[in-house]
Amino acid sequence: MCLLALASQADAAAREYQLDPVHTRIAFQVDHAGFSRAIGTFSGATGTLVFDPDDWTTATLSVAVPLDSLDLGDAEWRERVLDRSFLDAGAQPTARFTSTRVEPTGEGTARVFGELSLRGTTREVALDVTLNALKRHPLTFRRTAGFSATGTLVRQDFGMTAWERLVGAEVTLQIEAEAIRGRADGATEDEDEATPTPDRENDDAAQE
């Protein structure tokens, strides 16, 4: 009975959040023939985060990224990257990341391991994640979590072997994400308002 009670308390502490596709963006950098590190971004990601800030090891994350949201600053280059030589977005239009385990690395930081499915191939990817804020949003008044994350992958691991002399193998990822607490966990507006946040007192004092 004691074990069941502890498990119930742990589940109650973990809350469900939905990724905000407007304020979630994934950027990548890759070497371009030694001249520069080309930058591209993806937007419109959706997904679910289950998160307890007091116990990161219980966190789970599932994300879907529409590849046709790719922005490279040039339409012709974008089409080349979306074709079969690279992302093959016509056949595999969505990249998916599902976490498998989370290892805390410090105060408000953790390494999140998960399976990235891209271009019909699934490989493990690790992301170094920082929790920027967990509080009520000043405009929506919804409980919101904000994160920054970085990671790397090797494009050949996902079958992208074209243009090896022109495009680097290692791809650096930089992610900025916001997730909004859902109603499915039984949270209410009153509960959100009553829950203290690290910056709440300072914000109130500044307004006065």
Image: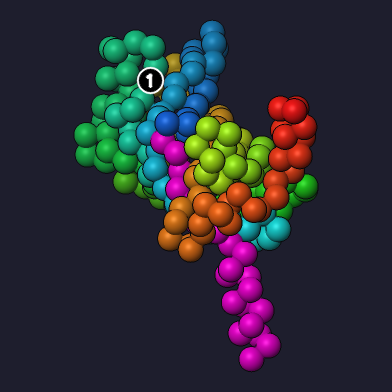
- Residue ID at (56%, 54%): 190
The image shows residue 142 at horizontal and vertical percentages of 52, 44
- Residue ID at (26%, 30%): 84
Establish if 75 lies above or below 208.
above
Seen as rendered, the residue at the extreme top is 35
Viewer-side residue, 150 vs 136: 136
Give the magenta range.
1-21
Q: Which residue is disc 1 drawn over?
A: 71
Q: Secondary structure at mark 1?
A: loop
User: Based on the displayed image, in which of its 4 quarters is residue 73 positioned?
Assistant: top left
For badge 1, the amino acid type reads: Asp
Q: Is residue 161 visible?
A: no
The N terminus is located in which quarter?
bottom right
Viewer-side residue, 138 vs 205: 205
- Residue ID at (33%, 14%): 77
User: Based on the displayed image, in which of its 4 quarters is residue 93 positioned?
Assistant: top left
The image shows residue 144 at horizontal and vertical percentages of 56, 43
The image shows residue 201 at horizontal and vertical percentages of 76, 39
